[in-house]
Image (spheres, rainbow, N blue to C red):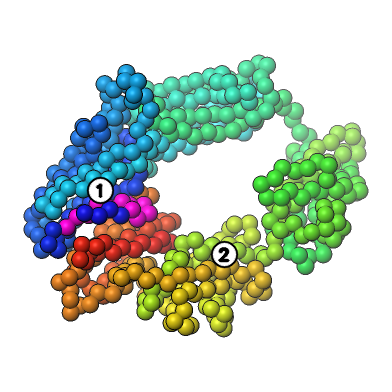
Amino acid sequence: MGFISILLFAACISSVKGNYQYVLAPNVIRLENEETLLVGIFGDGKNQIVTVYFEYLKKHISKNMTTIKDADHPVEVTIKITGDDLFKDIDASPKLKEKPKTIKLVCEGPYGKQVRDIALSYTPGYLIVQTDKPLYNPEEKVNVRVLAMDESMKPIKDKQLAIDLISPTNMTVGRISFDPGSNKNGFYKGQFEIPPFPDFGTWTIKAKLGGKLDTYAIAPIDVREFVLPTFGVEISTGREYILPNHTKIDVTVSAKYVYGKPVDGSAGLEINIRKKGDVSDPKRVLTIGRKPLNGSADFEVPIAKLLQSFGGQFPADAVLELSSTVYESATGKEESGADDSVMFVNCPFKFDLSRSKTTYREGFYYYIQIKMLHANGQPAGRKLFNLTIDGGSPNQHLTNEDGHYLAAHIQPENQNLKRMKIKVYDPAFENCAHELVLEQYTGERQIVVEKVEKEGASFIQANTDINIKQADKYSGILILITARGKIVQTKYFPPFKTPSFKLEQDVMDKVSPVGRVFAFMCTNAQLVADSSIFM
């Protein structure tokens, strides 16, 4: 008997004389949530009975007995662990006051019994908190709406839910409770009233599911004495980033009355630089002299002078903070505006290779998944980039409209190398290249599963080192596609060197934006498995 934990899913597998039984389950079981397990067999067995259940304090929970027709027909089993299963009749015991962190998954069948611990989660589902506006005055009504959804994005209607109004001093000043079954569509609505003499600052609306669940969500609101502005101030720069070779940045301050007429007056400009993760230092503000304003005023900020005021070094990944106070000529009334949308960057693009494998197999093609982004994190669609392997000549590629690229058929320049270095970069910014170092996988048995593109369509393909002349030594191959902890599709193949199947559109829709494919086989009572993320 052997156990394996592969990313999102956990497997229990055991064998007798080349026949195997298995159960695949999420690595985390969520309380009060229906979870799907996959139960199956490998080998030549027929109509085998496999029993799956959870065990807690010697109590069997959600027991399911399933008949597996053959290796071609694994069965999906739905289970659910409730609060009553874990806590009914035991809450009074001082030894059991803490919530259990794990629960035992048990699989019994013709080829033995397997047991493994799986983590328990008390935060199933999703809560989204909305208010009718972001700013409130004393004694003003706050209208709140909460959308409660389960893991399948279906409305939660059978749970207790509470919505709290919390002050800046962390005091709960109001609560609205909903009993199970009191809602029909998953939307919970309520209303609070701000006290007549409140603490000014950021208040919090908090929604939480009841019972033993810890699922919650919050939404901040501002409470302050409101004074109606007579005009608004906006700051624009016309750019998203500042590069080391930029010499200046043009800033425009605009001011208009609420009815649209331009303001006549004067405007000043204050500049600060905030490093990533830091708080602005008011002592480091650089002030640009005031200028006449007739609807707008233009400022030219020399980058070199700006950097000298902040230590002289180029502050890569920092944010340029701009603020302006406009004074109206006729009355002297003032209003302010701010902007922090411009970043200091060494390169206008960045690359995310986190969905690529960090190992490669000798003799197997390696597929690298590339996501190209603008400096502000937005996808860089239809952009050219260079890719090199082990310092070889660069090859130029184009991302799709979502900024993604799947580079196929990459093999090391030198087959004797035990590692391979891949480098991707914008053609004009090689100094900002992103590198990925791959180590050679040297396991005795090998399987690689990927999403690949062939003839304008998407396929899931597994490459194995199966010797077809000795196919009887292999169990066959199970390929499983998952998304958000749910099984989306399964495919079984007899022992084969390169099994593959086309990804249909309905599957792509279910896994969007990100899915995971998992493949495994057994040989000589050993599990051989692989998985990868795809977009």
| Amino acid of disc 1 | Leu
Front in this rendered view, residue 385 or 402 = 385
Image-based side of 480 in relation to 276, left or right: left
Q: Position of residue 24 (x, y in %)?
A: 26, 52
Determine whether the residue tagged by mark 1 lies in a helix, strand or loop.
strand
Instruction: Give the prevailing secondary structure in the magenta stretch.
Output: strand
- Whether residue 383 is visible, yes or no, is no
At horizontal 70% and vertical 45% (from top left) the residue drawn is 278
Q: Residues within 10 Å of mark 1 (few under 14, many from 20)?
A: many
Question: Is disc 2 surrounded by few (<14), some (14 to 19) or many (20+) residues within 10 Å?
Answer: many
Q: Are marks 1 and 2 in contact (CB under 8 Å)?
A: no
Which stretch did the figure color magenta? 5-15
| Residue 507 position within the rendered picture, expressed as x and y whole percent measured from the top left | 33, 59
Q: Where does label 2 land, which residue?
A: 351
Say if residue 496 shows up in the picture: yes
Residue 11 in the magenta stretch? The answer is yes
| Rendering coords of residue 327 (x, y %) | 87, 39
Residue that label 1 marks: 37
